[in-house]
Amino acid sequence: MSNETQAYVLHSKDSCVEKFPWGTLQWLCNDKLSPGAAQTVGLCHIQPGQRNPVHFHPNCEEILYMISGHGQHSYDGATVDLHPGSTIRIPAGVKHNMANVGSRPIVCLITFSSGDRQTVFLE
């Protein structure tokens, strides 16, 4: 593999994991991990009975794909049930969060339309 190709490959040991009382965000690609990236990609884990805080992204939309678990996603005041195989698109500026209402951890793939995802927490 050439040095140029290696610049685009990230191994899990090199990913960035943020830990919170409710779960984790594991970043797989963004402008910090891969300079010049125009997207952010990660895995979100939410523990049973927990939820992430209400927030929005002013500079990008988010697409969330449920891999496992059962969640209720708030979306600008409405609530949507999500289960494995569900996909939700959250436009920029829409207030949202996810609550784990199941007995197993939620695992979801999250993508953002910016390599420099910005988040504004509302609580």
Image: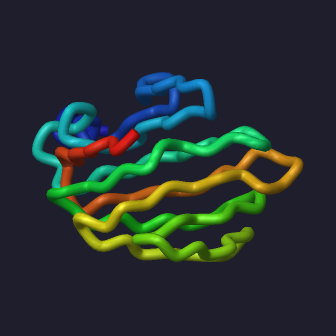
**Along the viewing direction, whichever of 20 and 53 lies nearer the viewer:** 53
Place of residue 58 in the rendered image (x, y in percent of width and height, measured from the top left): 18, 57
Q: Residue at x 61, y 44 (%)?
A: 51
The answer to which quarter of the image holds residue 16 is: top left
Place of residue 33 in the rendered image (x, y in percent of width and height, measured from the top left): 27, 33
Place of residue 80 in the rendered image (x, y in percent of width and height, measured from the top left): 61, 75
Farthest-out residue, left: 36
Q: Residue at x 19, y 40 (%)?
A: 31
Q: Residue at x 44, y 50 (%)?
A: 54
**Up-down relation of residue 80 to residue 47 (above or below):** below
> Which quarter of the rendering shows the C terminus?
top left
Left or right, residue 9 beside residue 26: left
Place of residue 120 in the rendered image (x, y in percent of width and height, measured from the top left): 26, 44
The answer to which quarter of the image holds residue 72 is: bottom right
Left or right, residue 71 beside residue 102: left
The answer to which quarter of the image holds residue 36 is: top left
Left or right, residue 100 beside residue 95: right
**Up-down relation of residue 45 to residue 12 (above or below):** below
**Along the viewing direction, whichever of 9 and 123 lies nearer the viewer:** 123
Q: What's the coloring here?
A: rainbow
**Up-down relation of residue 79 to residue 71 (above or below):** below
Q: Residue at x 20, y 49 (%)?
A: 115
Tally the marks.
Answer: 0
**Along the viewing direction, whichever of 80 and 113 lies nearer the viewer:** 80
> Which quarter of the rendering shows the N terminus?
top left
